[in-house]
Image: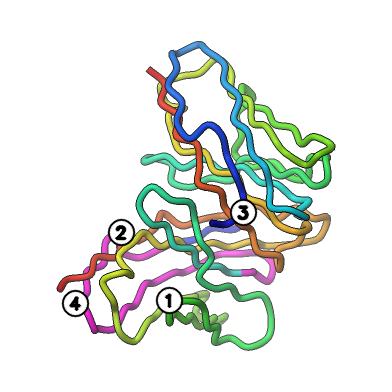
Amino acid sequence: AQSVTQLGSHVSVSEGALVLLRCNYSSSVPPYLFWYVQYPNQGLQLLLKYTTGATLVKGINGFEAEFKKSETSFHLTKPSAHMSDAAEYFCAVSAYSGGGADGLTFGKGTHLIIQP
Amino acid sequence: DSGVTQTPKHLITATGQRVTLRCSPRSGDLSVYWYQQSLDQGLQFLIQYYNGEERAKGNILERFSAQQFPDLHSELNLSSLELGDSALYFCASSVAAGSIKTQYFGPGTRLLVL
């Protein structure tokens, strides 16, 4: 079984400041990790994903995340926040073990607020 | 626009009723997933279909069922509805089964049970 913990249900940063959204996971098998963003009244959009290989993953809109196995973490960062980054962010894990079953387990989400 | 379509966008119904939510995956995608998003439970995986066959079950209630048709569209059936079933229901699709494949989410169906 797998689980995801997102620290901080709300994070507020000033425009231009560093964005750091925290995600820790638990998985009994090597995980695949994802960050999704949800804008108001919209579906989820994939920001980035880690499957295997390079542990620093770059995504869309200037976001990146680093997979740290020793810390079971997959924190999301962006060097400089923009007003358009205000949204709900979800970290998700899938512990694929074959057979084609790969539903995602999501964290509770972090609401990112950008202060002008 | 992810290419995944869901109908209807909004649905209001009464307790005890039955509803059907419909999802059309992206062109070429064989795998369909259903998720429920509610304030108290967050985003939960319900069920996955691949090329017409059920692949995985998550936290899906026995009152809920789904199927994927030969044209690959999927329907989620919710019966004996309760107030607590009010939520946003998302469909997602991917080109195949397997976690390295990105899941693309539709805009969701918002269900309100009164």
Amino acid type at image mark 1: Leu
Q: Percent x, y for residue B106?
A: 56, 48
Does the segment drawn in magenta span residue A29?
A: yes
Tags 2 and 4 both on a single chain: yes
**Magenta region's main secondary structure?**
strand
Amino acid type at image mark 2: Ser
Residue B3 is marked as 3
> Where does the magenta region start and end?
A6-32
Q: Percent x, y for residue B10?
A: 45, 31
Amino acid type at image mark 4: Ser
Residue A15 occupies quadrant? bottom left
Residue A76 is marked as 1
Q: Chain of mark 4?
A: A
Q: Earlier in the sequence, mark 1 or mark 2?
A: 2
Q: Chain of mark 2?
A: A
Q: Chain of mark 1?
A: A
Eye-nearest disc, 2 or 4:
4
Eye-nearest disc, 2 or 3:
3
**Neighbour tally class for label 1: few under 14, some 14-19, many 20 plus, Cα within 10 Å:** many
The residue positioned 70% from the left and 57% from the top of the image is B94
Does the segment drawn in magenta span residue A94?
A: no
Q: Nearer the viewer, residue B89 or A76?
A: B89
Residue A9 is marked as 2
The residue positioned 65% from the left and 52% from the top of the image is A103
Amino acid type at image mark 3: Gly
Q: Are marks 1 and 2 in contact (CB under 8 Å)?
A: no
Tags 1 and 4 both on a single chain: yes
